Image (cartoon, rainbow, N blue to C red):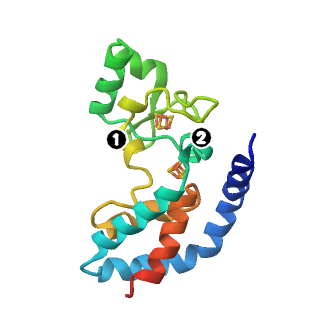
Amino acid sequence: MNRNFYLMERIIAELPFKAKEKHAENTKFFAKLKKKPPKNLDYVMTELHEKEFKRTDCLTCANCCKTTGPLFTNTDIERIAKHFRLKPQKFIETYLQLDEENDYVLQELPCTFLGTDNYCSIYDVRPKACKEFPHTNRKKFQQISHLTLKNVAICPAAFTIVEEMKKRVMI
Ligand code: SF4
Ligand code: SF4
């Protein structure tokens, strides 16, 4: 394992503690943001997201794929099942289960499709939720604050983006 992997391992191990420390501050910030989102919020979030992901190497991390799986929509299931030449029902039986909210999620974590090299074996057909994670460039970002409060404990990039956002967005 090279130095970058060790460094990332340490960052990931510390992340839940750092997120816990920031939780009250972040909750307060997002509550204010929801009430009065600035007009340029989408623009600022795109900028912060792009800047952070230019310097983040997801292949040294893959913490999202290891600790929290995506939701699979019907369109995701049809596309991925087709990739495996399986009937959607067979794909569901083999890989998925329903969660308490009746959404299809993975049967096990880390994700079955994650390789030991952190590459996704179904990258081109991966679920929409994987493509969009951690949703930090999402329009009307204030509407997914409940999700972001959880994601900052999982995703080092999301943590940094939120910290930068608190400096940039005056509310
Ligand atoms: S999206 Fe976040 S948690 Fe997932 S691999 Fe990239 S940095 Fe890690
Ligand atoms: S499908 Fe691919 S991107 Fe999505 S969680 Fe699994 S390994 Fe990660």
**Location of residue 69 with respect to 83 vertically, above or below:** below
Question: At x 40% / y 40%, what residue is drawn?
Answer: 71
N-terminal-most mark, 1 or 2: 2
Residue at point 71%, 61% (across, down)? 14
Label 1 crowding class (10 Å Cα cut-off): few <14, some 14-19, many 20+? some
User: As rendered, which of 140 and 98 lies closer to the eye?
Assistant: 140
Q: Is residue 122 above or below residue 31?
A: above
Quarter residue 116 falls in? top right
Which residue is found at the position 38% from the left and 39% from the top? 103
Q: How many marks?
A: 2
Q: Residue 90 lies in what quarter of the image?
A: top left
Q: CA distance from mark 1 to mark 2?
A: 17 Å
**SS for tag 1?**
helix
Find disc 1 in the rendering and name its residue: 128
Q: Quadrant of the C terminus?
A: bottom left
- Looking at this rendering, what residue extends furthest in the left direction? 39
Q: Quadrant of the N terminus?
A: top right
Q: Give coordinates of residue 7: x percent, y percent.
A: 72, 54
Q: Residue at x 40, y 79 (%)?
A: 31
What amino acid type is highlighted by mark number 2?
Answer: Lys
Amino acid at circle 1: Lys
Mark 1 residue CB less than 8 A from any atom of ligand 2:
no
Name the side, left or right, on which 38 lies relative to 152: left
**Residue 42, position in %: x, y?**
29, 69
Q: Which residue is more in the foreground, 56 or 102?
A: 56
Q: Is mark 2 within 8 Å of ligand 2?
A: no
Q: For mark 2, give the secondary structure.
A: helix
Rendered view: 56 above or below 28? above
What is the x, y in percent for residue 9?
A: 71, 50
Q: Which residue corresponds to mark 2?
A: 66
Residue furthest bottom in the image: 171
